[in-house]
Image (cartoon, rainbow, N blue to C red):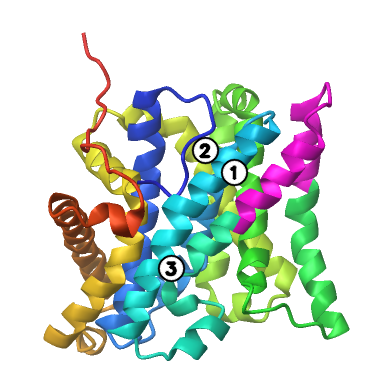
Amino acid sequence: MNFYQSDSTLSPNSRSVYLDALRGIAILLMITGHAFVFLARNEPNIINDFVITWHMPLFAAISGFVSFRETISMESARTKVKKRLTQQILPTIVLCTIWTSTLSPASWQDTIDSMYKGGYWYTFVALELYLIYLAILLIIRYSTKTRKIQSIIFILIIIGTPLCEKLLFILGISPSCRWLVPNLFKLLPFFFLGCLLKANERFLNQLLAHKPCVITAGSIFVIGCAIVLHTELYAHSSVFVRFLSTLFPILAFLLLFLSFGKKFENHNVTIILSRYGKDSLEIYLLHFFVLASLSYLIGLDFLTNFCPDIITYLILFMISIPIASICLYISKLLMQFGIYRYIFFTEKPTPTIARPITK
């Protein structure tokens, strides 16, 4: 089950192998970040600090890309919201309840008041993002120039969100953590960045056919990464500069992925990553239990004393792959024992991986 069922017009093969592989990379990076907390006792690591600045915004951008559509009816909007409430929010509440009652060190009250909800914050923010997007679609659904109006609105949101956040800070207004407003402010521009890229995908494909544009995108990605890796420069930058130093690398990365990603559809690694991407919701909801269980058996904080940061990160990244596989295996067991439907509130279809047809 995905965080987002695609509303776009991608072909099944292209969708499963192309975008789900990118989502698979994002989910593995997320597990790696959490592995530092559970297995490495949250020891400082410059590579992990760099990755966590953009792996969840990348997730939001992917979701915006696959959620884009030009228009929607009121009936279709109600159906989609009901589906997300049933298949994303209810499973999150069930597993968050089990997590808080068993392995989580936080109390119930701390979990409710926290902006991270015991680690399960993203599905709630994902619903808030989608509701905002649906509201925009419903407001402009009778316009004759829907795509152009949407693009203008997306750009205004991308630019206006960090400015609004800065204004609230100046006024001394603290966004509500209970309702995840800080996280919503953080991911809102990136969700609509994904929507903007999908709305103008044809133009971008034409643009990326020219080598200078691809080189420019690559240069922006490298410069943005260099700013974030330069911790002192990044820490002393303004909120808006830090936002831009995250936005532009993600934009450049997505442009490069649009340019080169389809060339690797037949690769076995891409197909494996797409399997993780297709079932990203199960992996997200179950990986906390796996990591917490492993933390009682092994501790890898000694790595930070003997290994360079890049080696430590690569080791934990390699560990994240079997952790994701264990989550998928647990999901399969839950399905075999008939428990799956009571946790995820849906019947899981037999997993299949669409492969491009070769002549």
Mark 2 to mark 1 CA distance (whole Å): 8 Å
Most frequent secondary structure within the magenta stretch? helix
Q: Please tell me whether mark 3 sits on a helix, a strand or a loop.
A: helix
Q: Residue furthest right?
A: 171
Q: Is residue 196 left or right of residue 218?
A: right
- Above or below for 201 versus 174: above
User: Which dot, 1 or 3, sits closer to the camera?
Assistant: 3
- Above or below for 72 versus 136: above
Let me know if residue 219 appears in the view: no
At x 60%, y 69%, the residue is: 183
Residue at which label 3 appears? 93
In this view, the residue in front, 71 or 85, is 85
User: Which dot, 2 or 1, sits closer to the camera?
Assistant: 2
Q: Quadrant of residue 107?
A: bottom left
Kindly indicate whether the residue at mark 1 contacts the one at mark 2 (C-beta within 8 angstroms): yes
Residue type of the residue flagged with mark 3: Ile
Q: Quadrant of residue 232?
A: bottom right
Residue at which label 1 appears? 194
Mark 1 to mark 3 CA distance (whole Å): 27 Å
Residue type of the residue flagged with mark 1: Gly
At x 31%, y 31%, the residue is: 264
